Amino acid sequence: MFNKKICVVGIGYVGLPCALMLAANGCTVAGFDTDEQKVRELNEGKTKLEKELQAVFETEEAHRNFSASTKLQEADIFVIAVPTPIDEDRKTADLAALKAAVKSVASVIREGNLVIVESTVPPLTMKNTVIPIFTESGVDCGKIFLAHCPERLLPGNVVREITYNNRIIGGYTPEAAELAADMYRLFVKGNISLTDDTTAEMCKLMENTYRDVNIALANELSEVCLALGIDVEEAIDLANLHPRVNLLKPGIGVGGHCLPIDPWFIHEVSPYNSTLINTARHINDGRPGKIAAIIRKYVSSDISQKFILLGQTYKPETTDIRESPAAEIYEILKGEGYSVTAYDSEVGSGKALLEEIRGCTFAFVLVPHKRMLKELEECLARMKETGEQIPQIISF
């Protein structure tokens, strides 16, 4: 029987699902966070989560075993799941939250405890950052166990992802990896692979870099096709008939907390050997500006012409707006003085779509939420019935 007390440090997008899954599977779990409002709302059961995660949160087992606090508690296992954002100027990892978390854990850790870092980090962070902080704090790292298990979550489907995705666990020692695997086996039904900590750090970055580079290729081919007057979707469909070709569809850019950030962590530690990664990042970062330029051509030079952008999240069927290229497109055009409105069915825009779309000459679909497209169809039908001006719909 697994009867360890677990403390999850950072109960946000990554930490909270992990904490609740552990609690729902019988573990005593303390969630630690410096955000007093978040802690209070969790303890009062007022936090609104994704439907499936909310169901886990409301189970009797999770309710009994999980609590949140702004005070770090002693535990047998510490899972660190704090944000590791990008320093936008330097394009390097900002490890301030991770360093603070490790220092906090160092103040309460005991011999034999296990520390698992789930935060996405550059390679060698465990060896060059985490271990030195523990050592400087007086902790003998030979008497504790350290592991890195990078999260693999997809916003909008976190319960299925955290349950069925394969997991990679990198231990500072093989024994640490085995101990961490014992914990994850409580709820993970996917395969669990054990390796060393640095390899695990690199694997997570490689996964997201693979996606980013392939998206960049599709986006660059789209721009070439546009210059040549070629229908890029038709060209990609035909090229994909080759048995060893699987080009992605181009888009408006790359968003979310992982894909626009993680490739930079590889470039940070080995810039000379990551020129393709660097180029792909610049292609995808520049995509919102190019989409804004296409929109300008449609609305011509009349900045008073009213139009609407549909979708502001970073991808369909989510409320997540982190690093959203759609939001960036809106800010570019708004900043240039255009009479542009943004609407998103998943985020909430205050007014109803019908009210927002009236008087618009164009409606540009940036993020095709299914519910929003249905709303759009209903609005256009209503406007046709009443004889109102119907905007031209342009989808990206």
Image: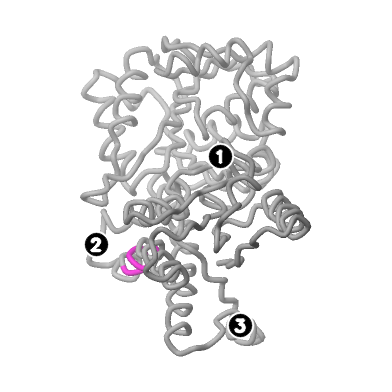
Element under label 3?
Answer: loop
Q: Distance between the residues labelled 3 and 2?
A: 30 Å
Colour pattern of the rendering: one colour
Magenta stretch: helix, strand or loop mostly: helix
Question: Does residue 90 appear in this view?
Answer: yes
Element under label 2?
Answer: helix
Q: In this view, does 288 lie above or below 335?
A: below
In the image, residue 280 lies in the stretch drawn in magenta: yes
| Amino acid bearing label 3 | Arg
| Amino acid bearing label 1 | Ser
Q: In this view, does 40 lie above or below 230?
A: above
Residue at the spot 46% in from the left edge and 17% down from the top edge: 32
Q: Which of 347 and 216 is in front in this view?
A: 347
Where is residue 1 drawn, in percent x and y?
Answer: 69, 20
Residue at the spot 41% in from the left edge and 31% down from the top edge: 82
Q: What stretch is highlighted in magenta?
A: 279-284
Where is residue 33 drawn, in percent x and y?
Answer: 44, 19
Q: Which disc is residue 349 wearing?
A: 1
The residue mark sitting in front, 2 or 1, is: 1
The residue mark sitting in front, 3 or 1, is: 1
> Around disc 1, counting alpha carbons within 10 Å, would you say few (fewer than 14), some (14 to 19), or many (20 or more)?
some
Asked whether the beta carbons under mark 3 and mark 1 sit within 8 Å of each other, the answer is no
Q: Nearer the viewer, residue 191 or 10?
A: 10
In the image, residue 360 lies in the stretch drawn in magenta: no
Q: In this view, does 23 lie above or below 53?
A: above
Q: Name the residue under label 3.
A: 244
> Around disc 3, counting alpha carbons within 10 Å, would you say few (fewer than 14), some (14 to 19), or many (20 or more)?
few
Where is residue 304 drawn, in percent x and y?
Answer: 41, 58
